[in-house]
Amino acid sequence: MALKLLLLIGLLAVNGLTNVHAQTSQEAPGADLIVHNARIYTGNPAQPAASAVAVKNGRIYSVGTDAEVLGLKNARTRVIDSGGRRLIPGIIDAHTHVLNEGGYNYTLRWDGVPTLRKALAMLSEQAKRTPEGHWVKVVGGWSPYQFEEKRFPTMDELRKAVPNRPLFVQYAYNRGFMNQQAMDALGVGTDKFPSLPGTELEKDAQGKYTGVVHGYTFTFIAIETMVPQLSFDEEVSSLVQTVHSLNRVGVTSIVDSGTGFRGYPKAQRTVDAVARDNRLNIRMPFVDIQFGEGENFNVVDAQINAITRTEPIAPGHNLHPQLAHGHVYRGAGELLSVEVHDHENFDRPTLIIAPEKMHELVERDIAKLVKRRIPFREHISYDENITPFLDALEKLNRKTPLDGLRWSIEHAETISPANIARVKALGGGIALDTKMALHGDGFIKTHGRDKALLTPRLRELVDSGIPLAMTTDAFRAASFNPWVGISWMVSGKSISGAEVLARDNRLSRGEALGLFTRKAAWFLHAEGEMGMIAPGYLADFVLLDRDYFVVPEAQIKSITSVLTVMDGRVVYGAQDYSSLSPALPEILPAWSPIKHFGGYYHAQ
C-alpha cells in the first residue's frame, strides 16, 4: 500500500512538472501593443468612443478606458501614449491604382503644392538632377485650381524650367504638356504618336505644335508606355515608396483597381518581392484589367484566361503568404470593355456610349463572369450610360441570377436617384470618388454650377443604405490623399475654395470618414473584420496630427498621420513617434524625385 502511494505521488509530481513546462512554453497572456490616452473614434455604434485599445496577434482584443486596457499589459507589451490625440480606424481606399504606379520613383508629384511658382521651382530643380537619357515627369495627382495662381503653367514657363531634358506634365487624364525634346521623342506629328479617339494636339497661329495634348485615358496610358521604364529593383523600390506615401496619410488598406500593362500576373513578381521582405505595409486586394491588341481582343476573355490558364487563381485567393486580405484576387474590372469606357474628363462634354454597346457588354461578357461567379466592377461615370447598363443587367439577372455575387459601379458621378435604387435592388454597390474635390471647378465650366452642386448625390446615396464607399481613384486621375476628398464632402468646397457641393448635399464628419472606413470594407469582402476599432477586428488604426472632429474645415485637407498601425504593427511614425517608424531601404534611383521631394508636399 505504501509503495502504491509513493508511485501515485511520483506520477502526480511528474505530471505537474509537465503542465508547468507546457504553460511556460505557451504565449504569455496580455497584449502585444496598447495605445492609451487617446480620443478614439471607433466607428462602432455599440461603443462609439474609448481612450485605449489593446492588440494581440494582429487583431484588436480590447477597447475601453485606460484603466481597463492598461491592465492587460505584460512585460513584453509595447505601450504607446497618444498624448490625447485623435485615433481613428485605418483608412480604406476601395478604388485606387497602386500597381499602375510602377514608375512612382521617376515621377515628381505636385500633390498639395500650394503655388504654381513653387511647382515650377521643383520642376527646375529636378531637371538639374535628372541624368541624360531620362525624362522629367509630373503625372497626375494635382489640379491647377490648387495653386494660388489658379491656372495651368504656360509652355514658356515649362520650357524655361526644363530646358535640356524631355518633359511631360500630365493633368489627370485630360491634358498633357510636352517640351520640344519630348515631342521629338514621342514622334508628335508622325505616325509614331498614338492617334487614339479624342486625341487633339494644339497648334499655334503658325500651325506649329505647341506641346499641349488633349485626350482621354488611353492616350495618356499609351504615352506612358513610350517613356523610359524602371528596372525591376527600381519597381520594387517604387512599390515600397508608394505604400509609404499612403501610410503617411493614414491609409492601411486599398483595392487595387486594375492596370492593363502591369496586370495579373505581370505585377506579381514585384508584389512578391515586397511581401517576402514583409514590406507590403498595406492590405491590397485587387481586381484585374487585361489589355491587348487586335480587332477581336476581348478584355473579359483575357481576364478569364489569365486566372484559369496563365496562373490559375480563384476569387478570394490570397497571394500574400501571411497578411489577411494582403493580396486577394477580387474579380474583374474596372474596365471590362474598351468600347464602353466613358472617360470622366470634366473639361469635355459627357461622353455618351451607344446603348447597344452597353447591352452587348452585359449580354456577351458580364454573363460569362456571372456564370463563373467572378465578382466584377465597371467604370461608368455618367447616368446616361448607367441606365442602359442596368437595363441589360436586370435582364441578365432574370435569366442568370446574380444571387449575391458582388459587383459595383465605379465612379457614378451623376447617377440619378432612380438608378441608385436599381443598383441596390440588384445587390450592387457604388464606389464613388473624390475627383470633384480637385476638378469640380472644371466641371462647373463644362456642365454648370447647378449640376455640380448635386455631383454626386452624396446625401441621397448615403441615405439609400446602398453599399457605398468614397475612393480616390489615384494616382493620376486625382490625388492619393483621402483628406482632400473628406474635406470636400464636409465643407462642400473644392481644392480652390469654391463651393461645388450644395449645403444639403454635404455629409457630417462621421459620415464622410465612414465612407473611407466601415462602409468601404464591403468592397474588400471584409465588413465583419475591417473598418472599425472593435474586438476581433484587424488591428489597423491611425493617430492623427490634429483632431479631425474639431479642427476648422479648412484644415481637414492638411491632416496627416503621426502613427499608422497595420496588422498590429507600426508601419509609419512621425513627430513624437518617428523612432517607431520602420526603416525603409534606400530609394532607387538616387536621382528620384521621391527621394528629394517626397510623395506629398506636406511631407517636406
Image: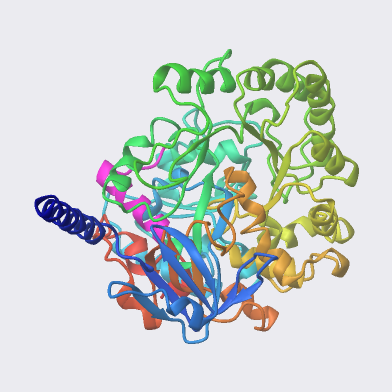
Residue under the image location 43 percent in, 35 percent down = 262
- The residue segment tinted magenta is 226-244
Seen as rendered, the residue at the extreme front is 1
Residue under the image location 65 percent in, 31 percent down = 197
> Which of 219 and 544 lies nearest the eye of the viewer?
544
232, above or below 361, in the image: below
What x and y, as percent, mark residue 364? 69, 15
What x and y, as percent, mark residue 137? 43, 54
422, above or below 451, in the image: above
- Specify the quadrant that holds the C terminus: bottom left
> Which of 436 and 198 lies nearest the eye of the viewer?
436
Q: Magenta residues: mostly which secondary structure?
A: helix
> Which of 507 and 223 lies nearest the eye of the viewer?
507
The image quarter in which residue 220 lies: top right
What x and y, as percent, mark residue 123? 42, 65
Seen as rendered, the residue at the extreme top is 296
Residue under the image location 80 percent in, 34 percent down = 385
Is residue 162 something one can see in this rendering? no
> Which of 108 and 521 lies nearest the eye of the viewer?
521
Left or right: where 396 falls relative to 282: right
Left or right: where 28 falls relative to 148: left
Left or right: where 14 falls relative to 408: left
Q: Is residue 231 magenta?
A: yes
Q: Is residue 179 magenta?
A: no
What x and y, as percent, mark residue 340? 70, 29
